[in-house]
Image (cartoon, grey):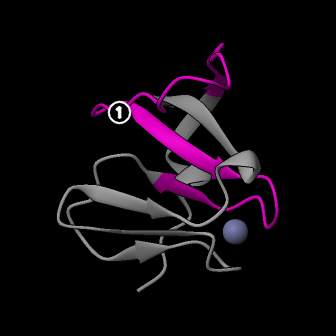
């Protein structure tokens, strides 16, 4: 099942030094800059972005190319 998180949340960019691990948290999401899909940083359900760069399940996201990931904070609309 595909959920468009942008319909539920408003996303704001987080300042993040590129040489540190990506932040994680209940309100942190990863935007794939390749396909613009957004995936939760702590996904409870299997979720992946359109191009396959981000693949999440069981509370963890596997990232193929970290240079194409932008961490964002989600706020309920
Ligand atoms: Zn992608």
Picture layout, residue 22 above or below residue 43: above
Query: Does the magenta portion include 20?
Result: yes
Give the image location of residue 39, x and y in percent: 49, 57
Dominant secondary structure (helix, strand or loop) of the stretch shown in magenta: loop
Question: Where in the figure is residue 26, as x and y percent of width and height?
Answer: 27, 34
Mark 1 surroundings within 10 Å by alpha-carbon count, few (fewer than 14), some (14 through 19), many (20 or more): some
Q: Name the image quarter holding the N terminus.
A: bottom left
Q: Does the magenta stretch include residue 59?
A: no
Residue at the far right in the pictured view: 34
Query: Residue 72 versus residue 17: which sits nearer the camera?
Result: 17
For residue 70, side relative to residue 54 (left or right): right
Decide if residue 46 is on the left or right side of residue 54. left
Q: Residue furthest front?
A: 19
Ligand 1 falls in which quarter?
bottom right
Where in the figure is residue 60, as x and y percent of width and height? 28, 57
Q: Mark 1 points at which residue?
A: 24
List the single residue furthest toward the bottom.
1
Residue shown at 58%/52% (left/top)? 7
Residue at 48% over, 80% down: 2
Residue 48, position as x, y percentages in the image: 49, 74
Residue at 68% x, 25% y: name it.
18
What are the residue bounds of the magenta stretch? Answer: 12-39
Say if 35 sits above or below 70 in the image. Answer: below
12, 34: nearer the viewer: 34
The part of the image, by quadrant, that contains residue 57 is bottom left
Dividing the picture into quadrants, the one containing residue 12 is top right
């Amino acid at each position: 099942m595909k959920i468009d998180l942008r319909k539920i949340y408003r996303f704001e960019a987080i300042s993040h030094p590129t040489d540190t691990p990506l932040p994680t948290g209940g309100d942190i999401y990863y935007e794939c800059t390749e396909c613009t899909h957004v995936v939760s940083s702590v996904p409870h359900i299997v979720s992946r972005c359109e191009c396959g760069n981000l693949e999440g399940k069981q509370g963890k996201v596997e990232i193929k190319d970290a240079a194409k990931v932008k961490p964002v904070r989600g706020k309920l609309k």
